[in-house]
Amino acid sequence: MLDSELKSKINQLWDKFWSGGISNPLIAIEQMSYLMFMKRLSDNDNMNKNKAMLIGEEYTSIFEDCNDCDWSFWKDKSADNMLSHVRDKVFPFLRDMGGDGSLYSRYMKDAVFSIPTGTLLVEAVNIIEDMHIKDQNRDTQGDLYEYLLSELTTSGKNGQFRTPRHIIKMIVELTNPKIGETICDPACGTAGFLINAYHHILKSNTSLELIKTDDEGNMYNLRGDKISKDDFQFLKNNALFGYDFDQTMVRISLMNLMMHGISNPQIDQLNTLSTRFTQKEQFDVILANPPFKGSINKEELNEDFTVTTTKTEILFLELMYNNLNIGGRCGVVVPQGILFGNSKAHKSIRKVLLEDCRMDAVISMPSGVFKPYAGVATAVLIFTKGESTGNVMFYDMEADGFSLDDKRNFIDGKGDIPDIIEKFNSRFEEKFENRKEKCFMVPFNEIKENDFGLSISNYKEIEHEEIEYEAPVILKEKIMNLENKIMEELNDLDSLLKN
């Protein structure tokens, strides 16, 4: 949703940090986040001050107790003066925002300002200052931050594993979060699922005449004008929950949500598989791409788990089931092994999801979706807790709108995704009986008889073309004739060379 000029500024920012000696992409993201957040605080403070003046109200600046912490005060300082001022005064102010008891100050208390030189700081500040916001109706600051995070996926920036945004958007569309619901990601990373769920709710509650679309088909100006004041407060303060065991990712998630206007994000540093996390029915929607192929120490494992395993991809599925309210929906990315694994743990978790939930859809994705990180084949499971499974929709996704090699070049950005959403929304009206197609239905009883297997290959019918081959004696004769012809030509060539 950004024009080429703004994207170019982000790329310049990356280049300055790389050349300035900050080669770890997560540290670079963290330091860039602090600067962008300082700029946002200053812009918002000025905007609120002007609004108060227009309506004749008094306004107390966020910088009242530290006037020289305002971006506009120090942005033009010399390199050495700026570095010492930001490091010793502005950053401590930023770190202590919200008071001692706030979530923000709790996770910022150990944060370190590590931009090494005044020259790099000045260059970064100038680039951020030059990021001209063309349309104040668009959440451009949030878009800037999302684009900054998206650069982790590019070649040379081998950063934290990120779920492609178009895959996140598809899963959010399928689970359809609504106003008033609580939404959770138990392994939130950079909070991509939570941001998209927030935007989905805003879009669903914005008058059509207000919604605008950019050149790439992305919607913006999502005002949520149909949402009541109380519901908006709930959405911004009590609806979105995220957990991650990595403190850096927690800080980035907090920044990301706050950049998108969510004033009090419920983000916590916590391993949700451990004994520290309380498993209970508490969320209406759970969205996640949890870690694959991981394991957890048995001594740390939460006692609420009933499936005996230390494999994280299985444990996260039971965690999500345990934490969903009755009638709650879940959309989760899983490795294909979950669908057909023969271990007792694999079969047990599939049995739970099929017998104690309504398994709505199994979407098999091509292996290139998560390149360049990994070529592992994955699937998306969509299920609803507390309802019985009737027919399960299977979809064999062949394209996601990008090339499936390491380059992941843009094709149309959609692939089969619009068709998946359309088929999913009409699954109760349509039968989808043809198992030779990409999408088809399989009844629960058939799946149960098949060891609760959810691999699409168990049910899809492959149409084989019958090919008639010539008899071996005829093929042999043709080969001999071809060999004789080659020998004749070689002899002719030999004679030419001798002459």
Image (cartoon, helix red, strand yellow):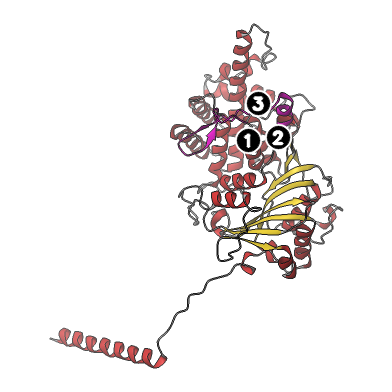
Instruction: Return the disc, 2 or 3, that comes first in the chain's sequence.
Output: 3
Kind of residue indicated by mark 1: Ser
In the image, residue 173 above or below residue 108? below
Residue 179's disc number = 2
Query: Where is residue 484 drawn, in percent x and y?
Result: 28, 90
230 within the magenta span: yes
Q: Are marks 3 and 1 in contact (CB under 8 Å)?
A: no
Q: Is residue 115 visible?
A: no
Residue type beneath disc 3 = Phe
Mark closest to the chain's N terminus, 3 or 1 = 3
Nearest the viewer among 443 and 182 is 443
What residue is disc 1 on? 204
Say left or right for 140 vs 295: left
3D distance between C-alphas at marks 3 and 1: 38 Å
Magenta-drawn segment? 206-235
Which residue reaches farthest left? 499
In the image, which disc is placed on residue 73? none
Q: How many marks?
A: 3
> Based on the displayed image, in which of its 4 quarters is residue 485 positioned?
bottom left
Cβ–Cβ under 8 Å for marks 2 and 3: no
Quadrant of the rendering where the C terminus is positioned: bottom left
Q: State whether residue 212 is above or below residue 68.
A: below
Task: Find the distance from the CA under tag 2 to the CA under tag 3.
Answer: 36 Å
Closer mark to the observer between disc 3 and disc 1:
1
